[in-house]
Amino acid sequence: MKELMLGNKAVARGLYEAGVAVASSYPGTPSTETTEEAAKFEEIYCEWAPNEKVAMETAFGASRAGKRSYCAMKHVGLNVAADPLFTMSYTGVNAGMVILVADDPGMHSSQNEQDSRHYAIAAKMPMLEPADSQEAKDFVIEAYDISEQFDTPVLIKMCTRVAHSQSVVETGERAEIPVKPYVKDAAKYVMVPANAKRRHPIVEERTRKLVAFAEESHLNRVEEGSDTSMGIITSSTSYQYVKEVFGDKYPVLKIGLINPLPEKKIKDFAAKVDKLVVVEELDPIIETHCKTLGLEVTGKDIFPLIDEFSQGLIATKLGLPEKPACKPIEGLPGRPPAMCAGCPHRGMFYVLSKLKLTVMGDIGCYTLGATPPLCAIDTTECMGASISSLHGFNKALGADAEKKTVAVIGDSTFMHSGMTGLANIAYNQTNSTVIILDNSITGMTGHQQNPTTGFNLRGDPAGKIDLEALVRAMGINRVRVVDPYNLAEAEAAVKEELAAEEPSVIISRRPCALLKKVKRGEPIQVNPDKCKSCKACMKLGCPAISFKDGHAHVDTTQCFGCKVCSELCKFGAFETLAGEAITW
Amino acid sequence: MVTSIMIVGVGGQGSLLASKLLGRAAMDKGYDVKVSEVHGMSQRGGSVVTYVKFGDKVNSPIIDKGEADYIISFELLEAARYVQFLKPGGQIVTNSQQIDPMPVIAGTAEYPSELIEKMEAAGAKVDAIDALTIAEQAGSSKATNIVLMGVFSKYISEISKEEWIKAVEASVPAKFLDLNMKAFEMGLAAE
Ligand SMILES: Cc1ncc(C[n+]2csc(CCOP(=O)(O)OP(=O)(O)O)c2C)c(N)n1
Ligand code: SF4
Ligand code: SF4
């Protein structure tokens, strides 16, 4: 059957057809839907793990037990899971195992633009790179065969434009894969130095065999062209742009197995063309390989190292004229993302901004607290860094900093990698104040469950970690819960905990306004006769409040009815749609 | 020949359903189709773009400057933001609704005036319609996207009304089908 499918859904279809039994992932754009879609197949057990390292090790355990397994993450997730990755390359697998990593050139939803292909090279692991949804499905199936044939986990690298584009996919049947019995084998699975020393040559030998495979495999295919004055080596979404610009004019070597790269195939291709061009996003991986082979090649001398590519970019860099277009309209205001109307995070950020605190930030919807008008967050690096860097900041500056600095971290991020930072605070004792923004969901990535929500990936009841009990058990004595819709309560709590002479954790608790189970309040309005135009409420940055005709104005289609704005009005200008005073 | 359509708007406005509908209609018609979406950060009220392309063979899933035949926009300022992606003389079908972006709310910028005139001066043809009000008349502001698709369907001669309706049926949940059919018809009938 033919179906229009998102690249990530096609990956899930591939998992189904490949007979995969276990998937464990941590959400991250643009990888998330692969696991969500896989969960729609009853045959595949799917879960959200607390972080990528745990996900990868879980998938590895399933492979070792003898069933085909899968885990997915975004590019920065592979940093978290790099430790198991490198050693799993030594041990190899039992049943096939595939690790999907999704890069985000152009940083649509990421904090950096790293190129995951480096990991495949560094970990000496094969990596496949599909260029559309059909390939995404086919390559997944192929990856399991490679995994079992060569005794290694296999990486699949997606990028935003392959993961989040829909194209036509021909579907097939599920293969029933028998369980491969687990056999105790210390020399293969116990990576103490003596054993690892014997495994490393096996890895090098495997790479030699994989290079031979790369020479012959249809994954790397030559498409002939009528004009051999130029030949293009490319992969992933760049291949689509090249074809869009040149059609069948120039010969193309399309790389599907990006690690290890073939040698003879590339040399033969180069010999047939006058000029060799490599088109690849981000870092010069194929290009560097060509240069090691002694080939002269055009690549990053004309193509950028930054941002995603497009057909227009490739055309102009290779000398074609720009297409005629409508003229851009200058001076339009931007539309950056913002926290939703009624977002529970907003109240806490208002308080932090009002108290002029230094705020160590983290990653999630709440990172938007860094944007105007709140501008409440000072830092954002990677998941978990808020808490650990607060400890370092406070160690460096002592009491001065401790009274004026906090960390903010979401519930999912706290479970992912915040706990270890808090362990450091509890153990090495800084007088730090940590605020867990508990909105009972993993918001930013599209609302996934996590260990604190009480539900599993499929939405069924599951184990639930009690944050207060957890934090206390870690040795933090001062733990309190506040409602961020109640600004006075939230402000008092922050002031008291900053003043306290021991570490404390404030749990700012309110579910995300977009959750289905959360009831919207009644929208409210501004009485223009009472509004004195002081703009105090505008400091919240609620997208439902604007300034119209000299007064604050609430867009009632957007308003969530959280009433936080009304707490900021000294003149009682906010009222119900019936014109009555706001009550709590 | 490839037809290139950009669907633009504010994150959360329902552009994913619109692209699903369009992709579906084109695919049922036997075209090769690619749709490129944006998930993640910008879905939180940011500016969002979806590309839909159909034809005999579609390579790139994205649309570059000067390539779009049509822009469907759920919000006026967003239509203007992407006008340079249109071919000269390309068609914009836009909701006339205005949603203030954060810089306007925060008071550091003003919502620009005369946007329709500016888009026309840039070389575009503009069909602006109050899709929100029509959707409310149809029964829910949530159907604004389908109203716009109804308006837009008139421009695509390759796909018949019956084929659009089949695609609507296949793309929306059964319990909202009546609402969406009504919204689509009202968009189609709107002048
Ligand atoms: C290592 C890593 N994995 C995944 C992500 C993607 N990601 C960004 S924020 C986030 C979680 C946000 O959830 P939470 O902390 O609960 O905050 P919320 O968005 O709900 O406010 C994830 C998974 C990432 N940036 N880095
Ligand atoms: S999705 Fe939820 S947590 Fe994220 S900004 Fe919106 S209300 Fe806040
Ligand atoms: S009550 Fe006020 S702050 Fe809350 S969503 Fe409505 S306008 Fe925004």
Image: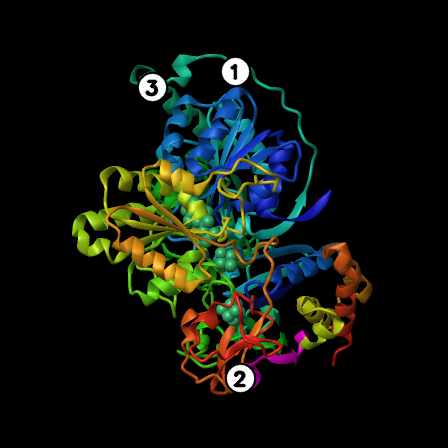
Image coordinates for residue A519, horizontal then vertical, percent? 60, 58
Residue B128 covered by magenta stretch: yes
- The residue where tag 1 is placed is A182
Magenta part of the chain: B114-132
- The residue where tag 3 is placed is A196
Position of A117 relative to A447 (above/below): above
State the mark number for residue B118: 2
Position of A390 relative to A326 (above/below): above
**Amino acid under disc 1:** Tyr
* Nearer to us in this view, A390 or B91: A390
* Nearer to us in this view, A490 or A286: A490
Read off the chain for label 1.
A
Q: Are marks 3 and 1 in contact (CB under 8 Å)?
A: no
- Considering the numbered disc 1 on the image, is that residue within a helix, a strand or a loop? loop
Q: Are marks 2 and 3 in contact (CB under 8 Å)?
A: no
Q: In this figure, which colouring scheme has been used for the structure? A: rainbow
**Amino acid under disc 3:** Ala
| Mark before the other along the chain sequence, 3 or 1 | 1
Position of the N terminus of chain A, as image quadrant, is top right
Disc 1 CB within 8 Å of nearest ligand 1 atom: no
Disc 3 CB within 8 Å of nearest ligand 1 atom: no
Measure how far apart labels 1 and 2 are at the Cα level: 69 Å
Q: Are marks 1 and 2 in contact (CB under 8 Å)?
A: no
Image coordinates for residue A513, horizontal then vertical, percent? 54, 58
- Residue sitting at 70 percent across and 33 percent down? A173
Q: Nearer the viewer, mark 3 or mark 1?
A: 1
Q: Residues within 10 Å of mark 1 (few under 14, many from 20)?
A: few
